[in-house]
Image (spheres, grey):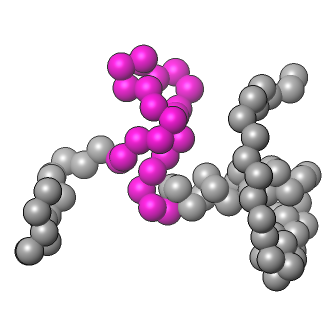
Amino acid sequence: MAINRPQRLQIMLTGEELAALDNWRFKAHMPSRASAIRELLQRGLAAEGFSLATVGRHSGTYGVIAEPLSETPPKRRPGRRR
């Protein structure tokens, strides 16, 4: 079954960036550049504390990108105002 992906994203890369992407793609056995970019995007977002929506969540908690839940509020850095 094909996954519906109606959004197109065009990016420009240097030769070195493309070579790095292709090297990683082949090492990770990814079937295409697009799948490699999606995987790297998901990993990068997760590393920054963001996650993709999980199947089976209630509509009230649904979001494509959401900040992780924390038991304690984040500490504010001195000198910063919100």
Magenta stretch, main secondary structure class: loop
Q: Which residue is drawn at 47% across and 41% down?
A: 65
| Image quadrant in which the N terminus is located | top right
Expressed as whole percent of the image width and height from the top left, the position of residue 36 reads 79, 57
**Where 13 falls versus 37 (above or below)?**
below
User: Does 18 appear above or below 73?
Assistant: below
Q: Which residue lies furthest to the bottom in this view?
A: 16
Is residue 60 highlighted in magenta? yes
The segment highlighted magenta reads 47-68
**77 w.r.t. 37: above or below:** below
Residue 29 picture location, percent across and down: 88, 60
Q: Which of 37 and 58 is in front in this view?
A: 37
Q: Residue at x 90, y 53 (%)?
A: 32
Whether residue 76 is in magenta: the answer is no
Residue 62 percent location from the top left of the image: 44, 26
Q: Is residue 30 visible?
A: no
Going by the image, does 2 lie left or right of 40? right
Residue at the extreme top: 59
Residue 55 versus residue 2: which sits nearer the camera?
2
